[in-house]
Image (cartoon, helix red, strand yellow):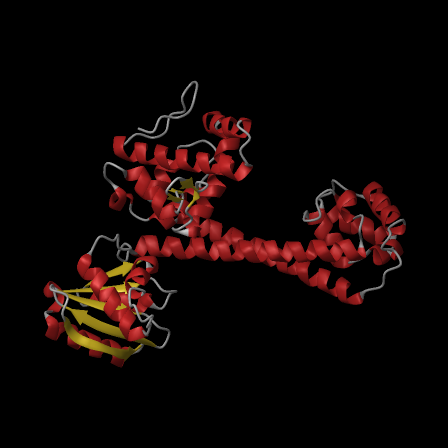
Amino acid sequence: MVYVGVDIGKEKHAIAAVDAAGSVLAAPRFINQDATGFASLIAQLNDLGGPEGVLVAMEATGHYWKALRSELEMHGYRADTINPLITSREASADVRGRKTDKLDALAIARVARRGGYSAAPSRDTAYDALKSLVRQRRHLVRRRTEAKMRYSCCLDVVFSEAVRTFEDIYSATAQAVMERFPSARLIAEADIRSLTTTTAKASGGQLARTFADTLRDAARCSVSRAIINEGEEFAITQLVAEIRVLDEQIRQVNERIEACEAPEAARLLQSIKGAGKILPRIVAAEIGDLARFAGPRMSSRVLAFAGCEPRVRESGSWRGKVKMSKRGNANFRHSLYLMAGTVRLNSPCFNVIYQSQIAKGKHHTVAMSHVMRKLIEVMCGMYKTGKLFIPPQTGVPACS
């Protein structure tokens, strides 16, 4: 077997090959990230033994590796994508501290020859589409959060009492009012009929003249009443429009995610009360095919993939504090955290775990990590038994 290592770059990739004994068969060289470069690589791989005798390995660096892996798999080659943490250990072994792209390609080839790693799953059209939707949703939610934070900061300047007056400054009524009258100064000067019409329309008739009077009185008594900052006022109108657009885009993405066929992991997690439909699919998109984790220590392997396993540091009689390693899929870990939050509020058996940790004086995030661990154990138990989740009458859920 010939092992080919590829150090991924944005415009060009370094490639090198070693044989089963570790001897260099092909000195490191560069190929361009284009059709000509890919054709040159395929020709070289064919000379080295073809799909039956060559294994290609590359780091999961950014997104630049995806096109190359697709090309290799289209020509029948096995293309393993390896965690950069594994290959960096090999690359840093040089006593002279040398580090170049060509040397990294050789290091990746040697890691592939030695084995002992878990390669990223191969392309799967359904999983790839779902993962792209999930990543887009996360991007939109992050942008909306930033817009809301900026919107809140602007309100603190031009209408300090907005939080107490509206109760929810992100509600449809608050956004409609602030878009048309984006400061305490403008609300105080507004015609009461226009203000009443705006609040009534935005609230569906639930808030009308009485609320409009209260709102204008609060604006007239506001400590921001004398502030004239047209820049902040303009920013508020734009931020309200941006939040509305992002809300609609997130709704559209959610519809697409729900329309996707639920993977096995999503189907299992949906049986847990409080998980909903979106979060199980988000978690499943990051896990991929559960079969690749199957085995005696399935839950431990999934936890390690998420970076939720404990990290122990000790030397001699010294023992450091045990912490979550966080050396795993950050997106998977984040989505698992969100699901743990909703599940523990709706499923008493998971809330027992959370409350028991809080009773011990643990921090909220530490208690949540225990809920996350139990979620993984329950999911793996359901996968092994082929049964959906049935909440226990008392105590915590079993793992299998």
Q: Residue at x 47, y 47 (%)?
A: 334
Work out whether 184 lies above or below 66: above
Q: Residue at x 77, y 51 (%)?
A: 198
Judge whether 180 appears above or below 348 on screen. Answer: below
Left or right of 15? Residue 259 is right
Residue 396, image x and y in percent? 42, 24
Whether residue 270 is visible here, answered yes or no, is: no
Front-lying residue, 247 or 27 = 27
Viewer-closest of 232 and 250 = 232
Can residue 376 be seen from the camera position used here? yes
Q: Quadrant of residue 311?
A: top left
Is 400 or 108 nearer to us in this picture? 108
Q: Position of residue 308 (x, y in %)?
A: 40, 43
Quarter in which the C terminus is drawn:
top left
Q: Residue furthest front?
A: 317
Is 114 left or right of 327, judged from the image as shown? left
Which residue ends up furthest to the top in the rendered image?
393
Residue at 28% in and 75% down: 102
- 257 w.r.t. 31: above or below: above
Report the quarter where the N terminus lies: bottom left
Q: Is residue 125 left or right of residue 202?
A: left
User: Left or right: where does residue 100 sit relative to residue 353?
Assistant: left
Q: Which percent across, then down, holds residue 13?
A: 30, 74
- Measuring from the top left, give residue 252's x and y in whole percent: 50, 53
